[in-house]
């Protein structure tokens, strides 16, 4: 089978690897579509804090069940599925407390398990989620990042009609804005350096936008909220400036949720401002099964996550695709591979 493989020279190649054999509690899935994540790009650039080559890349996929291990019930050949890449134990204190994102022995593709960009993958049956007919393969490959965004929005707890600023409109920020629009009818301000990202979000959510290289994000937010500030500010970019801006932009009693974590060094936080304005600063990490279920429902009901898939390629083009993405723009929001 074909696999998109990062070799120990940090070159992406399409490698022919043996097909995996599913264990008793595992399911063999034929991958249909898979999305490139920021994590894949940072492994490729060899600047990820944990992950190293060699490995099969990828962890955001949709696919079709081929066959099941002997102990698996409820799944059969032809079932259309989203495969969650977060394999949690279900038994540790965090899992039992309903916080699987903090599982002490979580296993992840590309770290403890093979990556998922290959024709066939063997994964535990417990991480499969059924795809309704309305959710096509491309949208299915968007479920993982949309679940990350959904968890972030849940952590932000916006009320209906809230004012929300999203700083950084890469895929996660963009998907969070989409959810704030579709679920919470939020009044949105989105900032990003890429005009193509801003245009896409204005079209999909009606968001006001600001390019931080052209105007002050804080000032734009102040004008938009008549000096009051935002109920919620989501920080989906790892520039320390975004975090500093976010704390300036939240209203008194507002909430700042940090999504991005890949800071160079540790950013400073304006603690006096947090104190004076009684702000809440929260973190958010990954997602749980509730997020996945909600996201599948939202997509089935028409939330247009597929619109973010600006580029779709064949696995055979993987070497060139990674090189082009690492080299910069080209108007990429989300890039997918279609395997079949
Ligand atoms: Zn991802
Ligand atoms: Zn656990």
Image (spheres, grey):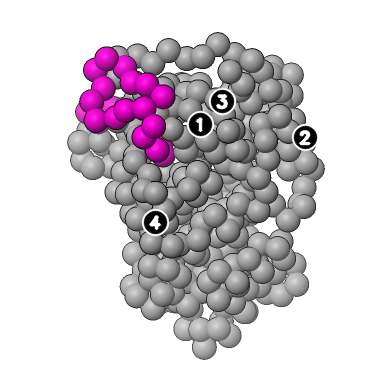
In what quadrant of the picture does the C terminus appear? Answer: top right
Distance between the Cα atoms at labels 1 and 3? 7 Å
User: Circle 1 sits in a helix, a strand or a loop, which is it?
Assistant: strand
Residue topped by disc 4: 300
Residue highlighted by disc 1: 31
Q: Is residue 70 magenta?
A: yes
Q: At x 77% / y 34%, what residue is drawn?
A: 320
Q: Secondary structure at mark 2?
A: helix
Q: Are marks 1 and 3 in contact (CB under 8 Å)?
A: yes
Q: Residues within 10 Å of mark 4 (few under 14, many from 20)?
A: some
Say which label, 1 or 2, has the lower sequence index.
1
Answer above or below: position of 165 versus 93: below
Q: What is the magenta range?
A: 66-91
Residue at 55% from the left image edge and 38% from the top image edge:
33
The answer to if 239 sits in the magenta stretch is: no
- Comparing 314 with 268, the one in front is 314
Residue 270 percent coordinates (x, y): 51, 63
What residue does disc 3 label? 118
Q: Which of the marked residues, 4 or 1, is nearer the chain's N terminus?
A: 1
The mark lying in front, picked from 4 and 3, is 4
Between the residue at mark 1 and the residue at mark 2, the CA separation in whole angstroms equals 21 Å
Mark 4, secondary structure of its residue? helix
When the figure is inspected, residue 65 is found, relative to residue 232, above or below; the finding is: above
Q: Earlier in the sequence, mark 1 or mark 3?
A: 1
Structural distance between the alpha carbons of marks 3 and 2: 17 Å
Task: State yes or no: discs 4 and 3 in contact (Cβ < 8 Å).
Answer: no
């Amino acid at each position: 089978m074909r696999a998109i493989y990062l070799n120990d020279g940090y070159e992406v190649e399409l490698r022919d690897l043996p097909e995996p054999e599913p264990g008793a509690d595992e399911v063999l899935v034929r991958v249909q579509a898979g999305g490139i994540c920021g994590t894949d790009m940072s492994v490729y650039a060899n600047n990820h804090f944990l992950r190293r080559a060699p490995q099969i890349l990828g962890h955001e996929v949709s696919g079709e069940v081929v066959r099941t291990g002997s102990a698996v019930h409820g799944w059969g050949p032809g079932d259309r599925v989203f495969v969650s890449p977060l394999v949690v134990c279900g038994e540790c204190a965090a899992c039992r407390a309903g916080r699987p994102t903090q599982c002490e022995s979580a296993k992840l593709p590309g770290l403890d398990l093979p990556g998922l960009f290959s024709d066939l993958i063997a994964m535990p049956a417990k991480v499969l989620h059924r795809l309704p007919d309305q959710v096509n393969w491309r949208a299915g490959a968007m479920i993982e990042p949309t679940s990350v965004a959904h968890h972030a929005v849940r952590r932000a707890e916006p009320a209906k009609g809230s004012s929300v600023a999203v700083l950084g409109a890469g895929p996660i920020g963009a998907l969070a804005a989409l959810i704030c629009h579709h679920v919470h009818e939020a009044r949105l301000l989105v900032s990003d350096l890429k005009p193509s990202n801003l245009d896409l979000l204005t079209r999909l959510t009606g968001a006001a936008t600001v390019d931080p290289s052209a105007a002050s994000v804080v000032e734009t937010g102040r004008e938009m909220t008549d000096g009051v500030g935002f109920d919620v500010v989501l920080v989906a970019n790892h520039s320390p400036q975004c975090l500093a801006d976010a704390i300036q932009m939240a209203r008194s009693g507002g909430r700042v949720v940090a999504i991005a974590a890949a800071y160079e060094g540790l950013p400073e936080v304006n603690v006096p401002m947090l104190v004076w304005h009684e702000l809440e600063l929260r973190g958010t990490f990954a997602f749980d099964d509730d997020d996945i279920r909600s996201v599948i429902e939202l997509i089935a009901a028409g939330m247009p996550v597929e619109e973010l898939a600006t580029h779709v390629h064949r696995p055979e083009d993987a070497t060139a695709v990674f090189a082009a993405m690492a080299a910069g723009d080209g108007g990429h929001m989300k890039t997918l591979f279609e395997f079949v």
